[in-house]
Amino acid sequence: MSSIVTGAAPPRPAMGRFERYLSLWVGLCIVAGIGLGHLLPGLFARVAAAEVARVNLIVAVLIWLMIVPMLLKIDFGALGSVRQHWKGVGVTLFINWAVKPFSMAALGALFIGWLFAPLLPAGEGSSYIAGLILLAAAPCTAMVFVWSNLCDGEPTYTLSQVALNDVIMVFLFAPLVGLLLGVASVTVPWDTLLISVVLYIIVPVVVAQVVRRVVLAQGGEIALDRLLGRLGPVSLVSLLATLVLLFGFQGGAIVAQPLVIGLLAVPILIQVYLNAGLAYWLSRRFGVAWCVAAPAALIGASNFFELAVAAAISLFGLNSGAALATVVGVLVEVPVMLSVVAIVKRSQGWYERGMPADI
């Protein structure tokens, strides 16, 4: 996750050891968090109390250390390349912002609010649905470069699409989340939601771009690559520490009803395959080249789980069902996205046979 992403010649990042075994690390965090929460309840109580204006200071620092290194990779100069692949960009924007958040809200209501309701803790259904909505409200920023590389995707398209999504996210995340939470009958603390957008989207984007410009001006891409290499472990440790905190607070509920995690994974898995499949089919229908359609399907299905975790903690608290639901997204991220990579690669022949003759 330490590769630089620039507008001129975006590199092809490989999947590192951490990303490959992300589900394993999350599983270890579940065990560690539950154990520490049981052994050190006083420590976790003090962590929960470290709040200012409903923002947990410790978690805020961890989220910043997690997100800023990812945003350092984004070159907003790539926005100039958007028109080069306008069909693929259009399909992905439609899926990311007009389909995915709403399909997740519908799936959450169907499975969590109705079908699985008797199997879930009483009174937690709305909180779980809120977490699912937060998970789907913004597309992934960092890992999609890895997925695009694994399926031999067009790097310029991937870079320009991610840069455009990040710009849109600044303006749409809060109203989209507010709308869907309201439809799901979840009380929306608008002041906290707006604070979360400022703290976890706007400020990190600004900080990352300022640092990026300064480093590039002083030492070029080599210096930026070196900085990202140093920050990579910091970002990963921050993610794991955040997960340990979450599971420390959620340990009692998980031990009491371990089936909850599996039930929450069902709508997440369905929405990933649904949106990836729809993006892939639409790309084929509109004559988008396969090297663009493949990453379009992956970006269309991706979730910015780091932002979702941060927003869930800010809005509903560390021990909320919403926070737990977002963490389930982290748990299934790598295996499910790798399966989508495999599907689009194996279907390349089928895809290209159905391409319109005039492209």
Image (tube, rainbow, N blue to C red):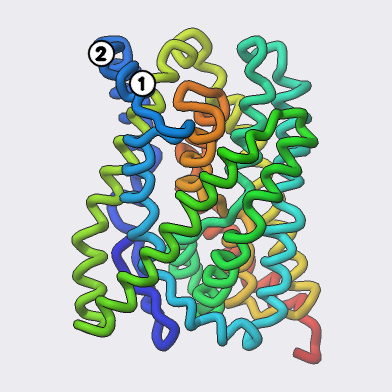
- For label 1, count other residues whose C-alpha is less than 10 Å away and answer few (under 14), some (14-19) or many (20+): many
Residue at left 36%, top 67%? 72
Residue that label 2 marks: 40
- The quadrant of the rendering that contains the C terminus is bottom right
Q: CA distance from mark 2 to mark 1?
A: 9 Å
Residue 319 visible here:
yes
Q: Are marks 2 and 1 in contact (CB under 8 Å)?
A: yes
Residue that label 1 marks: 248
Name the outermost residue toward the bottom: 358
Residue 144 relative to residue 9: left or right: right
Amino acid, disc 1: Gly
Residue 317: x and y in percent read 49, 27
Vertical side of 162 occupied by 42: above or below: above
**Residue closer to the observer: 332 or 343:** 332
Residue 49: x and y in percent read 37, 22
Q: Find residue 92 and report its image quarter.
A: bottom right
Vertical side of 298 occupied by 262: above or below: above
Mark 2, secondary structure of its residue: loop
Vertical side of 272 occupied by 299: above or below: below
Amino acid, disc 2: Leu
Residue at left 33%, top 78%? 213
**Residue closer to the observer: 253 or 197:** 197
Residue 143 visible here:
no
